[in-house]
Image (cartoon, rainbow, N blue to C red):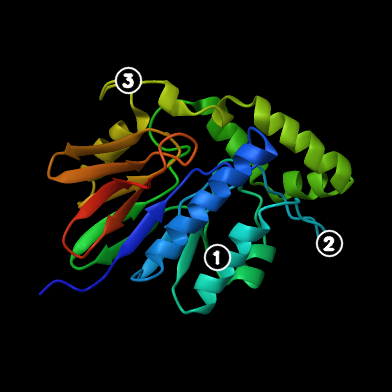
């Protein structure tokens, strides 16, 4: 008999863009989704880029998002585990969110087994071939030295500078505007294919691409969660199958 479980996955809200009003609308929509899934959720996985920018100074954090943070704290306090994955836009989360909200931070991939099915879970950035420039930049941004140097900037200037940089980044634009590039050009598809040569996984679940994808790769399935900028998509594993769904 399959376990009576409901594991939920969502990614790429990019709260903070393109405006306070638009961001607030998406925040409230996501909160309504959380209110819905908390009724039967066994676990909730927030798989990166929840914020378009985040940096925790020792005594200051970016303004906004209090409604979402309060809802996450409420669900976490109820005993439902919430896993928060580092994305390429919110990789500078330190101890504030884990301590205040009770979430469990996931710095890299997470490999889990649910109801006999093996899952490879990751935000999706920096995987697969190519994009050497970003991979180098990711190593720099994740370095303790880079984080220490940025923390020397006054929060008013540092958060403003990072916000401007984030908005101008090509990663801020929904990749869904870029159609599926084909199996030989989609870096996450290539990653899955290469990984399966090493070991078996039933499901690969990623964000980052901003394009909802549900495709078979050999005997495995690759699910991309899409985003909450245009698609409002998510996935749920019910102990039998992993389903890609849309929140209306």
Disc 2, SS: loop
Q: Where in the figure is residue 83, as x and y percent of width and height?
A: 47, 63
Q: Quadrant of the C terminus?
A: top left
Q: Is residue 165 visible?
A: yes
* Along the viewing direction, whichever of 71 and 226 lies nearer the viewer: 71
Mark 2: few, some, or many residues within 10 Å (few <14, many ≥20)? few
Give yes or no for contact between labels 2 and 3 (Cβ–Cβ under 8 Å).
Answer: no
* Along the viewing direction, whichever of 142 and 220 lies nearer the viewer: 220
Q: Nearer the viewer, mark 1 or mark 3?
A: 1
The residue where tag 1 is placed is 72
Q: Where in the figure is residue 31, as x and y percent of width and height?
A: 51, 57
Q: Nearer the viewer, mark 2 or mark 1?
A: 1
The residue where tag 3 is placed is 181
Residue at 54% across / 44% down in the picture? Answer: 26
Mark 3: few, some, or many residues within 10 Å (few <14, many ≥20)? few
Mark 1: few, some, or many residues within 10 Å (few <14, many ≥20)? many
Q: Where in the figure is residue 236, as x and y percent of width and height?
A: 30, 56
Q: Where in the figure is residue 57, as x and y percent of width and height?
A: 79, 55
The residue where tag 2 is placed is 59
Q: CA distance from mark 1 to mark 3?
A: 35 Å
Q: Is residue 146 above or below residue 181?
A: below
Q: Is residue 104 above or below residue 84?
A: below
Dot 1 or dot 3, earlier in sequence: 1
Residue at 45% across / 64% down in the picture? Answer: 35
| Left or right: where 77 falls relative to 122 | right
| Left or right: where 19 falls relative to 180 | right
Dot 2 or dot 1, earlier in sequence: 2
């Amino acid at each position: 008999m399959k376990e009576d479980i409901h594991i939920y996955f969502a990614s790429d809200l990019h709260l903070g863009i393109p405006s306070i009003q638009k961001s607030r609308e998406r925040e409230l929509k996501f909160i309504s989704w959380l209110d819905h899934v908390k009724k039967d959720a066994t676990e909730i996985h927030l798989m990166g880029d929840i914020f378009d920018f985040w940096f925790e100074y020792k005594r200051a954090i970016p303004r906004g998002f209090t409604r979402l943070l309060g809802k996450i704290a409420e669900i976490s306090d109820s005993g439902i585990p919430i896993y928060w994955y580092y994305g390429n836009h919110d990789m500078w989360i330190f101890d504030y969110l884990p301590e205040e909200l009770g979430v469990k931070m996931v710095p890299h991939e997470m490999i889990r087994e649910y109801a006999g099915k093996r899952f490879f879970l990751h935000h999706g950035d920096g995987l697969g071939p190519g994009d050497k420039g970003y991979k180098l930049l990711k190593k720099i941004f994740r370095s303790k030295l880079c984080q220490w140097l940025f923390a020397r900037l006054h929060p008013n200037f540092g958060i403003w500078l990072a916000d401007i940089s984030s908005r101008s980044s090509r990663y801020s634009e929904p990749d869904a505007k870029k159609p599926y590039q084909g199996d030989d050009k989609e870096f996450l598809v290539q990653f899955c294919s290469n990984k399966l040569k090493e070991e078996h996984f039933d499901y690969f679940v990623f964000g980052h691409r901003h394009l909802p994808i549900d495709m078979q790769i050999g005997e495995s399935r690759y699910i991309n969660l899409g985003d909450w900028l245009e698609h409002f998509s998510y996935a749920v594993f019910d102990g039998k199958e992993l389903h890609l769904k849309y929140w209306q």
